Image (spheres, grey):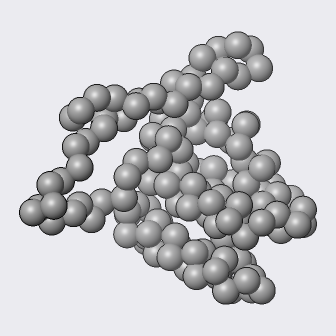
Amino acid sequence: PLGVAFYCHRDENWSLVCVSFPIEACPSPAEEPPTAVPPHPLAALGHTERGGAHVAEVFEPQFRQLLLGSQGDSISDVRGALWALSQLASGPAGLWILTEKVDGVSLLDLMVANACESPQLAVRGTALYVLEYMRATNPLVA
């Protein structure tokens, strides 16, 4: 690895929550480009209980609002939320966040609803893609 990237955030108790992941070198033009998706900070957080609890507290309400689409959010914000949630689901704590129901609806339910019912074709396509990505990367989803 070339180095390590960090994502850090202070919670309401001023506790520092940090996640790190290695930075790999880009292949030379003669080599075949990698097919792996680059790491997302939420993917690392979804692998630990403390990280999952942090995401549930800080980010889950924002994701829920974006997926409900009630705030007139941009299409790219909704698509970004879908992608971030698919990365989060790569870990057991992240998958728990997606399946936890609030008012009878989970984030996973909202992702499926976006895949089936969104009036925006780009949101539908992204939702379908990330649902398949989640199935392929986490055996618990299948």
Question: x, y (%) of residue 83?
Answer: 56, 61
Please give left or right for residue 8 compared with residue 123 in the image: left
* Picture residue at 24% right of the left edge, 32% below the top: 2
Most extreme residue toward the left is: 30
Instruction: Using the rendered image of the protein, determine whether residue 99 is visible from the camera's viewpoint.
Output: no
Which of the 4 quarters of the picture holds residue 10? top right
Q: Is residue 84 above or below residue 53?
A: below
* Picture residue at 53% right of the left edge, 51% below the top: 88
Q: Nearer the viewer, residue 85 or 141?
A: 85
Q: Is residue 93 above or below residue 30?
A: above
Question: x, y (%) of residue 131?
Answer: 52, 72
Most extreme residue toward the front is: 29
Instruction: Using the rendered image of the protein, determine whether residue 55 is visible from the camera's viewpoint.
Output: yes
Question: x, y (%) of residue 139?
Answer: 38, 63
Question: x, y (%) of residue 96?
Answer: 59, 51
* Picture residue at 21% right of the left edge, 35% below the top: 1
Please give left or right for residue 96 compared with residue 106 in the image: left
Q: Quadrant of the C terminus?
A: bottom left
Please give left or right for residue 78 compared with residue 1 in the image: right
* Picture residue at 22% right of the left edge, 43% below the top: 25
Which of the 4 quarters of the picture holds residue 58? top right
Q: Is residue 1 above or below residue 103?
A: above
Which of the 4 quarters of the picture holds residue 100? bottom right
Q: Is residue 10 above or below residue 64?
A: above
Q: Nearer the viewer, residue 102 or 14?
A: 14
Please give left or right for residue 29 compared with residue 11 in the image: left
Q: Nearer the viewer, residue 24 or 113?
A: 24
Counting labels gives 0
